[in-house]
Amino acid sequence: MNGGKQELSRAIRAQVDALAGELQVLAKAPGPAALQQARTGCALLAHHLAQGEAAQGFAALAGWLKLTYGAARLSETGAACDATLAALWHDRLSPELSGAARTTLIQGVARLTETLARPPGRALRVLFIGDCLIWDIATQLQIAAAAEGLAITPHLCAQRDAAELRRALDKAGPVDLVFYAPFGFGFAQSYARALAPGAAWRPMARDLPGLRAALDEVEATLSHLLAGTDAPIYLHDVSGTRQASGWRGAVTDHIGARRRARVAAWLNARLDALAQRAARPFLRIPEAAEAHRLGAAAGRVLFEAGDLHPTALAASLASGPYLRACRAAHLLARRKLVVSDLDNTLWAGEIGEGPITHHHDRQALLLRLKARGVLLAVASKNDPANVNWRGAALRASDFVACEIDWAPKAGNIAKIAARLNLAPESFVFLDDRADERALAEAGCPGLLALDPNAPETWQLLDDWAVQRAAFAGSDRTTLYQARAARQAYVATPSEDPGAAYRQLGLRVAIRTAKRRDLPRVGELIARTNQFNTTQVPISAKELSHPSRRVLIAEARDRFGSMGIVSALVIADGAEASEITQFVLSCRAFGYGIETALLQTALAARPGRRPLHGRINESPLNAPCREVYAANGFKLRDGIWEAQEPRPDLIPDWLSLDIAPDLRAIPAQVSE
């Protein structure tokens, strides 16, 4: 009934190690981290097949492999490995498969290798601001985008202190898109407190001062972003969704549902008001509507696939509004003009042959684009005497150029380009005939030709119009004057970056892990993608080996315990000690806990040997790449090295409780 998809899913799960090894070899990606990435990709494929989604599964596997192994390298090896991979997987799996499952496998592998062989385009630079929700979205988005041949270079910011966050944004550099989830699953501490299980019986009025302060910080951050970048900025609204798992999570969700809905509604009303007074329009991510559509499943883990464990809300937003926004930015951000056919494009029918029916919705969208700075033109095979605009939303005066005759459209488009001194690479061409679109693309390299009768074309153009909202009713001179005024307005001295943290009462206990801690440490290392310096998994057995020292940090604040949030594994050698794993939970980003743990490890090293660390870069671990440089380590031949601790780097808002065997750094009490 399902084309053997579930059968193939079971076979892949049973052979996942062997299949992953073959993928790794064919991709020429050695090392245990690469093997784990291949396992994750196979698990992702098996999940989609189990849901009856063969096309999505092989596309997701291709996207994951491009994301983790590098699209450029795979495009060089993909074409060559087509027959090899098909033969290997067929020989390994087919003896146990039905005919339907074998057909699904053969078709899927062909689709996979075709996608892998496609060279990547220009990378889209995307800034993500938020907590676990947006990090989860960023991962799923990159997989989906890579499957389409769209590369994303992410820059992720998770600083909870507003002043520190704004400094991090200044260092981000030029970006193409910004996504900001100011509340997420608990990015703002006052929001997390208002949604905590115990809050259901507390008067909401007690939480309002903290929520108002959080909104003030959101507005300040948005003003900073609006002043610092011309890129479209997408702001999440608030859903009240909390991460939850198991029956306890379901019970907690049910108990707190009404309270969370009230908090979300209160915040959303104020975010709407904030949007009305913003210096420049920003765009919205409909988190609340999507969470309502998903219901109780929104905060639950959708599936477990190796290193991937997305919530339903994150996966849905990534494949919906996030991917559409990235697609529009990638394909259209540099376009300046839409040149359109007329018959069966702007209206239904052929105007020279009889009555026509105007597509008022299409014309209205083109008028929106025109109002936002996009030029309009016509290239149509028609008798110009027959063309009129009676009953249309558009008028002849809306077009900067019209080429209406019987000449080839590619030549007429080239004429328009020459007349306007624009390159065809900046053009979008709408025509209902596939042959005309192909000829135009061949004659005008770089032109983007779209089918006007495909609904996704108008969704793409609508997303483009949304992203050009900032240009509505303004010329570039006015925009740049306004931008300078905004920059001057926000150029005020930053507040004490530790003030908010001191009020939290952050306490960090640092100690050597006990045997009972090792399963949690192993899980933290295995499931952490963003702040994971080496991306090398390690078993509880390996963690307990005498050659390893495992240091952990447990954190708590006025709202309760966070548990073990960071772990650092050290292998002691004769001449130096090396950090083999260093991870920090995304729940603890922005507090400086990683600095306290690293400086403690440096101070407590035996024999005063140098301490070494490495950064194995992956597409996901940007948040940890500066940790050694920020802690006084020096880079020598690809290895970070430090000789002496720098306790002065530990933030003074942390109260430290360091175990006696590690106490080369004195205990620190935040005032």
Image (cartoon, rainbow, N blue to C red):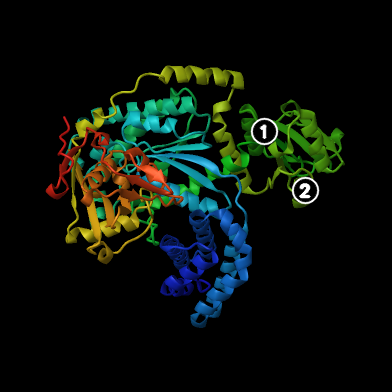
Please say if 584 is above or below 166.
below
- The answer to whether residue 29 is visible is yes
Quadrant of residue 35 within the rendered picture: bottom left
Please say if 504 is above or below 29.
above
Closest to the observer, 257 or 319:
319
Q: Which amino acid does label 2 sit on?
A: Ala
Q: Which amino acid does label 1 sit on?
A: Lys
Task: Please give left or right for residue 49 compared with residue 419 in the image.
Answer: left
Closest to the observer, 492 or 387:
492
Disc on the earlier residue, 1 or 2: 1
Going by the picture, which residue comes out furthest to the left?
660
Going by the picture, which residue comes out furthest to the bottom?
95
For image coordinates 51% across by 59% down, the residue present is 65
Please say if 364 is above or below 146.
above
Where disc 2 sits, the SS reads helix
Quadrant of residue 194 within the rendered picture: top left
Q: Where is residue 473 in the image (x, y as percent from the top left)?
A: 59, 22
Q: Where is residue 166 in the image (x, y as percent from the top left)?
A: 39, 29
Pointer 1 with pointer 2, Cβ within 8 A? no
Task: Please give left or right for residue 594 compared with residue 482 in the image.
Answer: left
Q: Name the residue under label 1.
A: 336
For image coordinates 53% across by 37% down, the residue present is 176
Q: Mark 2 points at which residue?
A: 442
Where disc 1 sits, the SS reads loop
